[in-house]
Image (cartoon, helix red, strand yellow):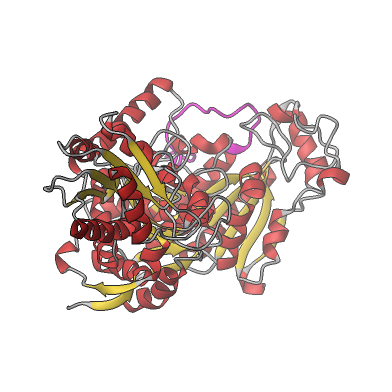
Amino acid sequence: MGKVLMKGNEAIGEAAIRAGCLNYFAYPITPQSEVAEYLSRRLPEVGGLFLQGESEVAVSYMILGAAAAGERVFTTSSSPGISLMSEGISYIAGMQLPAVFVNIMRGGPGLGGILPSQADYLQATKGIGHGDFRLLVMAPASVQEAAEMTMKAFPLAEKYRNPVMILGDGLIGQMMEPVEFHDNLKTKPVDKNGWATNGMDTRGSSQRNLIRSLYLDPEVLNRHNLELKAKYDRMQQEEIRFEAVNIDSDYKVLIVSYGTMSRVCRTAVDQLKAEGLEVGMIRPQTVFPFPEEAVGNAAAGKSCRAVASIEMSMGQMLEDVQRSVKGRQPVHWFGKCGGEVPTPEEVIEFVRSLAR
Amino acid sequence: MGKTFAKPEALSDQHTHYCPGCTHGVIHRLVAEVIDELGIRGRTVGVAPVGCAVLMYNYFTFDFMESAHGRAPAQATGIKRVRPDLIVFTYQGDGDLASIGMSEIVHAANRGEKITTIFVNNAVYGMTGGQMAPTTMPNQRTTTSPFGRNVEEVGMPIKVSELLASLQTDAYIARQTVIYPKHINRAKKAIKKAFQYQLDGRCFSFVEIVSTCPTNWGLTPVEAVKWAEEKMLPYYPLGEIKTPDKS
């Protein structure tokens, strides 16, 4: 199959099917309702399951139940809806179940707005629900990448028995771009009989499986927390993905930017290069785990004089960038919230001010 | 002569953590007997609530999951929708189901999910220490209604079975109790019927069991039985409230 022109939201829905996930539960919310609209038509065609839940809270537990039964399952939502799902996500992480959540971010707090934003960075990467856990979070910068990350999310969720999140912004969901679905990203689900509550007969076993997140004995809970931490540590070793732009040049300024914002920054990098100002960029494709070493090394580049975290939020990723740069360079923030995407001209102006 | 009374295969060997006079043990046994008699242990998945029965999986010998407070019907929906061949039931108390979980139970029932819910109504929050529940009786003293439930302030107790029966979707909804031996067989019949409706892929099925909580009621087990009989049964009448055959 060649390239097709698709809206990001629809491409995410189609990508999940192509990845071998035929179970989708959802609740409508702007700006990602097209995923549910698309899949309510598409899933029945392929013998899949579409169910609209009564709330995002309920949906998160439908996801939990389906994952516990050993089936691939995913949902999509946007910021306020993700907050409601965060309860279920905590249980899913505590129960060590594989599931995929897509957050097509809008502005906040509260109802905020319905336009593109990256306002949920800290929520996604630091603490989406109560308790001590992390998600593996991938941030696409194009419709193509959104589709690919969605397809990769299912085997990753199974590898770690942990929820995986695709952190897109409203523009990724709403814009149309050419996209190609790669058959080689379709994966077979792993054997889940060791833990799934899929009925003893399914497993041909007389041993029952029990799925829980309650550990009343503090020593046992501590061991459980350490077991979870080992998974997050392993993600740091094995799953960090990023793109380096113009990093072989004698860049004076290093930009760190992801998602839609990084597309604007790339235009700025190209235009500034044409003017004679070299600017490097690290674009995290995973924001947890964060490419700490790559950002730190790039910031230590000989010609580098300043680092900028450019994001559609009020300096949320900035904290990760500062942590990575470890005081070797001044770290600045530039961004806009509320749904306006900064223009290349605004980014250029800001970067020029750092290079002076 | 062989054994005439034995522990169901679906029950495990455990010391109970329930209080003296609590009815959870009887209800657990009835569920286990029904699962044995229907021969469905190998394809049953139980969903435990938050509340006194949070650890109920310790007493059973088939697949089990915990849930969050009130969310069991949504979770059971997830299991059943992706694996319709499994027999899925939730077991929930009145704080769990009738308060924080009201949305999940109403919508699961209204979608006609082919799951079974055992609803244990003892008119009080048990595990958290005897606080007022939506099913607490008028003037009943609890740790958060120390002067008795004031219906002027917090309304009347919710009759969950009748509320669910008002939905237009087919369902099997019954209310029974286990306070006297004569009730126990009727309760078991209702539970068996409920599971049978699920096995037949017929409808959502729901059995409310009027239960006792001597510890949080501040009564002896015998006084608690009398209290349930005198205060609860007139308000929560027993019987089949809705069946799919004549809804």
Is B14 included in the stretch rendered in magenta? yes
Q: Is A18 rendered above or below residue B14?
A: below
Q: Residue furthest left?
A: A248
- Horizontal side of A98 relative to A303 (left or right) equals right
Residue B85 coordinates in the image, percent (x, y):
38, 62
Identify which residue, B120 or A346, lies in the foreground: A346
Picture quadrant where residue A266 is located: bottom left
Residue in the picture at 39% in, 56% down: A66
Quadrant of the frame with the C terminus of chain B: bottom right
* Residue situated in front as seen by the camera: A253 or B193: A253
Q: Specify start and end residues of the magenta stretch as a single range.
A: B1-25
Q: Is residue A275 visible?
A: yes
Query: Horizontal and vertical percent for residue A151?
Result: 25, 61
Asked whether the viewer can see residue B47, the reply is no
Q: Which residue occupies the foreground of this view, B92 or B207? A: B92
Instruction: Pinpoint residue A148: horizontal percent, then vertical percent.
Output: 24, 62
Q: Nearer the viewer, residue A64 or A156?
A: A156
Image-based side of B101 in relation to A166, left or right: right
Q: Residue at x 61, y 27 (%)?
A: B19
B199 relative to A68 in the view: left or right: right
On the rendered image, what quadrant is the N terminus of chain B found in?
A: top left
* Residue reaching furthest to the front: A356
The residue lying at 29 percent from left, 40 percent from top is A307
Q: Main secondary structure of the magenta part?
A: loop
- Residue A344 colored in magenta in the image: no
What x and y, as percent, mark residue A325?
Answer: 27, 33
Residue A320 in which image quadrant: top left
